[in-house]
C-alpha cells in the first residue's frame, strides 16, 4: 500500500500561509512528519494556482525534496505549473506522480507531460459535466483514459485509476460504488491496473470526531477490495493498519472483546455500504 | 403466458399521526408501502391538505390567489372560518408571517392573541407556522404553543438553529412538530435524531425536507422525499418514518409563472389557470414522491388535488 | 437481462489485441456494457458470442421510435425505477386526441394548437409531441378523412391512429406509411390483422388490453406475428390503476427481465376537467408512462406539464445549471449590493432565496462553472480570480454599480486579493460562507 501524504494542501490554513510567504519551515516540518509516518509520496496541492503557479510548484518540489527522500505528487489543475515542477523534480527517489488527467478534454495535455517526463499519472474517472452514476460508468471512463494513455505513449503501469471518492454526508450511495469500481479497475488489465483514492474526502463535512473513524474503516474496506494507493493522512492510515485484524474479524461476523469498538466498526460498515442512511450522529443510534 | 406481478413487501412503516381533537381530528400516514401502492400493502389514511392563512393581510400574494380570500383575509379569524365552513378544509395552516422583524414585526403577544382567536373560531386542526426567522420564531412559537395547549396542533418549523426551544415548547404543550432541513436527506435525518434525543417522541414529528416549486428545483424535493420514504420502508429506519410535509403554497406563489401577465408572455397562456395549475402540479408531484401533508393556498388548486387523491386512493 | 462488463469479458477472445481501439478486452467489455461501443469492433469474436451478446444486450425496455425526422420521439430504454438512481432516459411524449367526429375546422384548429405549442425552457425545445386520431365514429371513411386532415394540417407531427377495426386502421394509416405512426387498438380479436397492417406500413402497434395478464399474452402473440415495435396499454384509466400497472410493468421488465412487458407504455388521461387531466398526467410523467394522451391543449397546462417532465427527467448526476447572467433580486438601485456565485442551480436557488428573505434589493452575478458549487468549482479551476474578473468585466454590470463593490462567497475568501488585482478600481468584500448567513450579513452592513 502506497500512502501519498495529503497534508501539504492549500486548503489547510497553515500550509496556505506558508506557501504565500514562501516560508519553508512549516512545509518541511509537515513533509518530514508525513515521511516518518509512512508516506511513500508527498502530495503538493497548490490549488488552481492561476498566478505564479509555476514558481510555487517549483518551490514546493524543491522545498520538500530538500528534506525528504521521496517523490512528489504534483497536484493542481494548472498544467504549466506541473511542468515546472517536473523540471526540478529529483527522480532519484522515484518518479513523480501527476494529479491528474481525466476524461475532460481540458485534462488531456497532462498525458503529454506524463509521456514527456516519463512519470506516473492519476486518471480520475470523471468526464466533463456530471459525475459517473455507478461503478460501471467509472469503468467505462477508465477504459477511455487507458486507451488515450496508450495513444499518448504512457504505459498502463504508470496510470493510477481514481474512482473519485465523494462525501458520505452528501453522496452516500457512492461510497459502495467506489469500492466496486476499485475491484473492476484492477481487472481491466493484466498485470492489474493500479488504483488510488483521495481518501479523506469520504468524511469531508462530517463532525471532527467521526472523521478518523470513517477514514480508517473506509480505507480498510478499499484495501480489502485491492486498492493500491491512497492520498491520505499517513498517521491515520498507520492507525488503521493496526486495527485491520479487529476490523476483518468484525467483517467476518466474529465477536471481538471491545464491544464499543465492535459497534463502531459495524455501524460504520453499514453506513459505507449504504444499508443505513448516514447522519452525523449515526454512531449514537 | 400470465403476468406474475412482482409485488414488494417492506420492513418499515410510516408513523400514523393524528392532529386536532374530537370529531374534527384528522389522521395521515400509517402506510407500509410507497405512495398509493395499496396493491401491495396497507394505506390506511389519505393525505391531508391544510389551507394556508396568515396573521396579516396577504398583500404580497399574487392577485390570482389573493382574490378568493378578498372578503376575509384582513381578519385571520374570518379567514380561518371561511376555510373551514366554505372551503370545507380538513385543516388550517396559520402562518404568523407578520411577526417577521422585516415585516410588521408583530410581537409574540400579538401572535398569541391571533392564535387564541383562531382556535376559538374553528374546530378543524390548526397548524401554526412561524415566519421562518430562526430567532424570532423561537420566541413566537414558545408563546403560541402554550396558548394552543392541548389542542393537538402542529407547531413549526423547527430547524437546526432553533429546534431546541421550539421542540421543548411543542413537547410541553402536547403538540406535533415540523422538523425542517434544507433539501438534504442526511441533515433531515440528523435533525430528527437531535430532536428525539431531547426526549421528543419521534412519532410526533413531521418531516419537512423543504419544498420547491415546479421548475425551481422541484426535482430535488421530489427525490429527497422519495429517498426518505425508501429509507423508511426498505431500511426500516425509525428516524425517517415520519410523515412528510409539502409546504407548497409559499414556494409556488412567488415564482414568475404564477404572477407574470399573459400580455407579457402570450405563449405561457392564461395567468389565473397557470398559477392554479402551478400549485396543483407541484402538489401532485410531491404526493407521488411521498408527501402526506400539504399546505396550499388556492381553493381551486386544492379542490383539483383532492379530486386527484379521490382517484389515487 | 443486461450483462455486466465482467460477464461480457468472458465472451471475448481475451487476446488484448487492441484492434477495437481499447487497450484490453476488459476495457472494451466495459464500454460494451455501457452500450458505448459495438461488438463489431472486435474482429475475432465468435458468432456464438455475438448471438449471446446481442440477446443479452437488448435493453429491458425495448427502444421504440415514434415519428420521423426532427419530431421523432424516442421511447423505452429505461433502466431504473427511481430517478435518483440514474437518469430516466427518454422523456414521455404528450399527445392530444382528435376524434374523427370533429369537423375539419375543429381538426385544423387542434393541429394548429399542437404546432403552436412549442416553447423554449432552460434551453430545451418543448412541445406537444403527437396527435392521436381516434375512430370514435366507427366509420372507416370518416377516420381516413380525419387522418388526411391531420396529415395536411400538422405535417411531420407523429400520429397515433386509434381504432379497433382493421379496415379503418388500414385506411387511415396510408398518409402516414413509413412515418413510424402508432396504430393503437390491437386486441385478442384483431391482433393478426392489425399486426399485418403495422408491418406493411412500418408502424408500431399499440395494444389495447384490459388487464396485465391479457397484455402480456398479447405482446407475445403480436411478436409472433413479426411486430416488435409495440406500445402497451394495460387498460388502466384511474390514477390509482395507472400507478399500480405502470409500476408492476416497470419492475417486471427491469428487475425480473420479463420480456413480455418490456415495451413503452401508453396512458390515456382524458378528463372533462382540464386541470384534473393535467394532474393525472403528472402521475404518468412521474410513474413510467412513455406516451400520455390528453383531450385538449391549453398553453398554461402545457407549460406546467413540460416543466414537470423536464424536472423529472433531469439527470440527477448532472448538476442543474442556471443561465450565466446578472440577476436582479427585488429592484436594485445603484448602491445595492452585488453578489457573485456559481451557476449550480441549487446554489442559485438558495442564495437568491436568502437574499430575498433579507428584503434587501440586490444583484446576483451567476457565473457559468458547469453547474459546480462554489468550493468544487474553485478546486476544479473554474471559479478563479481571472475568470471572475473576466465575467464581471464582460457582464457590463460596472455601469450599474458606481461604487464597484463585489461580494464573493466566504468559501473563496482566499481569492479576494487576486480578484481585486484583476479588477482595478473594484472593492472585493468577503461574504458569508453559507447562504443562510446572508440576511444577517446584509443587516450588519
Image (cartoon, rainbow, N blue to C red):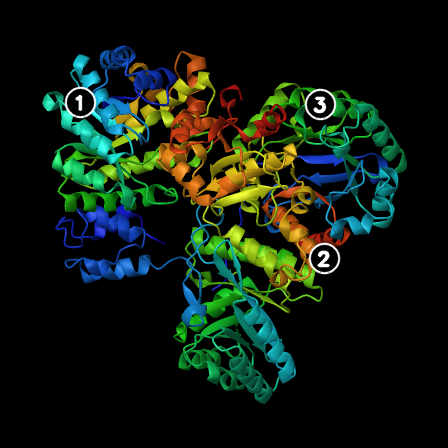
x 35%, y 60%: residue: C58
Observer-side mark, 1 or 2, equals 2
- Residue C165: image location, x then y, percent: 55, 82
SS at mark 1?
loop
SS at mark 2?
helix
Observer-side mark, 2 or 3, equals 2
Between the residue at mark 3 and the residue at mark 1, the CA separation in whole angstroms equals 56 Å
The dot on residue A71 is 1
Q: Is residue B88 above or below residue C342?
A: below
Residue farthest bottom in this picture: C141
* Quadrant position of residue B144: top right
Residue A95 appears in the picture as rendered? no
**Disc 2 chain ID:** B
Q: Are marks 2 and 3 on the same chain?
A: yes
Name the one closer to the observer, B146 or C426.
C426
Between the residue at mark 1 and the residue at mark 2, the CA separation in whole angstroms equals 68 Å
**Disc 1 chain ID:** A
- Residue C368: image location, x then y, percent: 43, 43
Among numbered discs 2 and 3, the one appearing first in the sequence:
3
**Disc 3 chain ID:** B
Residue pointed to by mark 3: B138
Q: Report crowding for label 1: few under 14, some 14 to 19, many 20 or more residues within 10 A (C-alpha).
A: many
* Quadrant position of residue C388: top left
SS at mark 3?
helix
Residue C1 appears in the picture as rendered? yes
Q: Is residue B52 above or below residue A25?
A: below
Q: Report crowding for label 3: few under 14, some 14 to 19, many 20 or more residues within 10 A (C-alpha).
A: many
Residue pointed to by mark 2: B272
- Tell me how many marks there are: 3
Q: Are marks 1 and 2 on the same chain?
A: no
Amino acid at each position: 500500500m502506497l500512502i501519498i501524504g495529503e497534508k501539504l494542501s492549500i486548503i489547510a490554513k497553515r500550509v496556505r500561509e506558508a506557501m504565500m510567504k514562501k516560508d519553508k519551515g512549516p512545509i518541511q516540518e509537515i513533509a518530514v512528519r508525513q515521511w516518518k509516518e509512512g508516506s511513500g509520496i508527498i502530495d503538493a496541492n497548490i490549488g488552481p494556482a492561476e498566478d505564479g503557479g509555476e514558481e510555487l510548484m517549483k518551490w514546493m518540489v524543491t522545498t520538500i525534496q530538500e528534506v525528504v527522500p521521496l517523490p512528489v505528487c504534483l497536484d493542481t489543475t494548472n498544467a504549466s505549473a506541473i511542468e515546472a515542477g517536473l523540471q526540478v523534480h529529483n527522480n532519484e527517489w522515484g518518479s513523480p506522480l501527476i494529479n491528474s488527467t481525466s476524461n475532460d478534454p481540458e485534462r488531456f495535455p497532462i498525458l503529454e507531460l506524463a509521456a514527456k517526463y516519463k512519470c506516473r499519472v492519476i486518471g480520475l474517472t470523471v468526464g466533463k459535466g456530471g459525475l459517473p452514476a455507478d461503478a460501471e460508468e467509472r469503468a467505462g471512463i477508465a477504459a477511455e483514459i487507458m486507451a488515450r494513455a496508450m495513444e499518448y505513449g504512457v504505459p498502463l503501469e504508470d496510470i493510477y485509476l481514481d474512482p473519485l471518492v465523494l462525501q458520505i454526508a452528501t453522496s452516500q450511495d457512492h461510497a459502495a460504488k467506489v469500492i466496486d469500481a476499485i475491484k473492476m479497475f484492477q481487472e481491466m488489465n493484466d498485470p492489474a491496473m493500479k488504483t488510488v483514492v483521495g481518501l479523506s474526502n469520504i468524511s469531508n463535512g462530517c463532525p471532527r470526531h467521526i472523521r478518523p473513524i470513517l477514514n480508517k474503516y473506509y480505507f480498510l474496506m478499499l484495501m480489502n477490495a485491492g486498492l493500491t494507493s491512497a492520498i491520505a493522512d499517513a498517521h491515520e492510515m498507520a492507525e488503521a493498519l493496526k486495527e485491520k485484524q479487529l476490523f476483518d474479524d468484525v467483517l467476518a461476523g466474529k465477536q471481538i472483546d471491545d464491544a464499543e469498538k465492535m459497534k463502531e466498526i459495524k455501524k460504520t460498515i453499514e453506513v459505507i455500504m449504504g444499508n443505513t442512511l448516514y447522519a452525523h450522529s449515526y454512531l449514537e443510534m | 403466458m400470465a403476468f406474475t406481478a412482482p409485488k414488494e413487501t417492506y420492513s418499515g412503516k410510516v408513523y400514523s399521526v393524528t392532529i386536532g381533537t374530537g370529531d374534527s381530528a384528522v389522521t395521515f400516514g400509517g402506510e407500509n408501502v410507497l405512495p398509493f401502492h395499496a396493491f401491495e400493502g396497507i394505506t390506511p389514511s389519505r393525505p391531508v391538505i391544510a389551507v394556508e392563512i396568515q396573521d396579516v393581510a396577504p398583500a404580497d400574494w399574487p392577485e390570482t390567489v389573493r382574490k378568493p380570500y378578498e372578503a376575509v383575509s384582513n381578519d385571520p379569524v374570518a379567514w380561518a372560518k371561511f376555510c373551514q365552513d366554505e372551503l370545507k378544509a380538513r385543516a388550517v395552516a396559520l402562518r404568523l408571517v407578520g411577526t417577521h422583524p422585516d415585516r410588521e414585526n408583530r410581537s409574540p403577544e400579538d401572535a398569541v392573541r391571533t392564535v387564541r382567536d383562531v382556535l376559538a373560531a374553528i374546530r378543524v386542526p390548526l397548524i401554526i407556522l412561524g415566519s421562518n426567522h430562526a430567532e424570532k420564531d423561537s420566541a413566537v412559537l414558545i408563546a403560541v404553543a402554550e396558548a394552543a395547549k392541548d389542542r393537538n396542533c402542529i407547531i413549526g418549523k423547527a430547524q437546526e438553529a432553533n429546534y431546541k426551544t421550539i421542540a421543548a415548547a411543542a413537547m410541553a404543550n402536547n403538540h406535533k412538530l415540523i422538523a425542517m432541513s434544507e433539501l438534504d436527506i442526511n441533515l433531515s435525518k440528523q435533525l430528527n435524531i437531535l430532536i428525539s434525543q431531547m426526549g421528543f417522541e419521534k412519532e410526533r414529528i413531521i418531516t419537512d425536507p423543504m419544498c420547491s416549486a415546479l421548475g425551481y428545483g422541484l426535482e430535488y424535493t421530489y427525490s429527497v422525499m422519495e429517498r426518505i420514504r425508501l429509507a423508511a420502508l426498505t431500511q426500516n429506519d425509525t428516524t425517517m418514518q415520519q410523515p412528510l410535509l409539502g409546504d407548497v403554497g409559499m414556494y409556488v406563489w412567488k415564482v414568475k409563472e404564477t404572477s407574470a401577465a399573459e400580455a407579457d408572455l402570450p405563449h405561457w397562456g392564461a395567468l389565473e389557470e397557470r398559477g392554479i395549475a402551478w400549485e396543483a402540479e407541484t402538489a401532485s408531484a410531491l404526493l407521488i414522491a411521498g408527501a402526506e401533508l400539504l399546505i396550499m393556498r388556492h381553493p381551486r388548486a386544492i379542490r383539483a388535488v383532492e379530486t386527484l387523491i379521490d382517484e389515487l386512493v | 437481462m443486461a450483462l455486466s462488463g465482467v460477464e461480457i469479458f468472458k465472451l471475448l477472445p481475451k487476446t488484448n489485441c487492441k484492434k477495437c481501439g481499447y487497450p484490453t478486452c476488459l476495457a472494451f467489455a466495459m464500454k460494451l456494457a455501457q452500450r458505448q461501443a459495438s461488438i463489431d469492433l472486435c474482429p475475432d469474436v465468435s458468432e456464438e458470442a455475438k448471438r449471446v451478446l446481442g440477446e443479452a444486450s437488448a435493453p429491458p425496455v425495448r427502444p421504440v421510435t415514434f415519428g420521423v425526422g426532427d419530431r421523432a420521439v424516442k421511447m423505452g430504454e429505461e433502466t431504473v425505477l427511481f430517478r435518483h438512481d440514474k437518469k430516466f432516459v427518454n422523456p414521455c411524449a404528450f399527445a392530444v386526441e382528435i376524434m374523427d367526429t370533429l369537423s375539419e375546422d375543429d381538426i385544423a384548429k387542434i393541429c394548429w394548437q399542437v404546432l403552436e405549442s412549442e416553447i423554449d425552457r432552460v434551453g430545451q425545445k418543448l412541445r406537444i409531441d403527437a396527435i392521436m386520431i381516434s375512430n370514435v365514429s366507427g366509420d372507416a371513411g370518416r377516420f381516413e378523412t380525419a387522418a388526411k386532415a391531420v396529415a395536411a394540417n400538422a405535417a411531420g407531427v407523429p400520429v397515433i391512429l386509434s381504432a379497433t377495426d382493421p379496415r379503418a386502421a388500414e385506411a387511415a394509416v396510408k398518409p402516414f406509411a413509413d412515418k413510424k405512426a402508432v396504430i393503437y387498438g390491437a386486441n385478442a380479436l384483431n391482433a393478426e390483422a392489425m399486426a399485418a397492417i403495422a408491418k406493411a406500413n412500418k408502424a408500431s402497434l399499440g395494444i389495447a388490453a384490459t388487464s396485465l395478464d391479457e397484455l402480456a399474452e398479447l405482446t407475445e402473440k403480436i411478436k409472433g406475428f413479426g411486430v416488435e415495435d409495440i406500445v402497451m396499454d394495460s387498460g388502466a384509466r384511474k390514477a390509482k390503476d395507472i400507478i399500480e400497472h405502470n409500476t408492476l410493468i416497470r419492475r417486471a421488465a427491469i428487475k425480473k427481465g420479463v420480456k413480455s412487458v418490456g415495451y413503452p407504455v401508453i396512458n390515456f388521461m382524458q378528463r372533462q376537467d382540464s386541470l384534473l387531466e393535467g394532474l393525472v398526467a403528472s402521475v404518468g410523467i412521474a410513474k413510467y408512462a412513455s406516451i400520455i394522451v390528453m383531450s385538449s391543449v391549453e398553453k398554461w397546462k402545457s407549460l406546467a406539464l413540460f416543466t414537470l417532465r423536464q424536472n423529472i427527467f433531469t439527470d440527477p448526476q448532472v448538476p442543474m445549471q442556471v443561465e450565466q447572467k446578472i440577476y436582479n433580486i427585488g429592484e436594485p438601485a445603484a448602491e445595492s449590493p452585488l453578489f457573485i456565485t456559481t451557476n449550480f442551480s441549487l446554489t442559485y436557488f438558495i442564495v437568491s432565496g436568502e437574499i430575498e428573505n433579507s428584503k434587501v434589493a440586490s444583484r446576483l452575478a451567476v457565473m457559468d462553472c458547469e453547474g459546480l458549487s462554489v468550493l468544487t468549482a474553485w478546486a476544479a479551476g473554474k471559479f478563479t480570480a481571472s475568470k471572475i474578473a473576466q465575467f464581471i468585466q464582460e457582464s457590463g454590470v460596472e455601469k450599474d454599480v458606481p461604487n464597484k463593490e463585489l461580494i464573493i462567497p466566504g468559501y473563496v475568501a482566499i481569492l479576494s486579493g487576486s480578484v481585486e488585482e484583476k479588477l482595478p478600481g473594484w472593492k472585493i468584500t468577503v461574504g458569508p460562507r453559507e447562504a443562510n448567513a446572508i440576511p444577517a450579513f446584509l443587516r450588519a452592513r
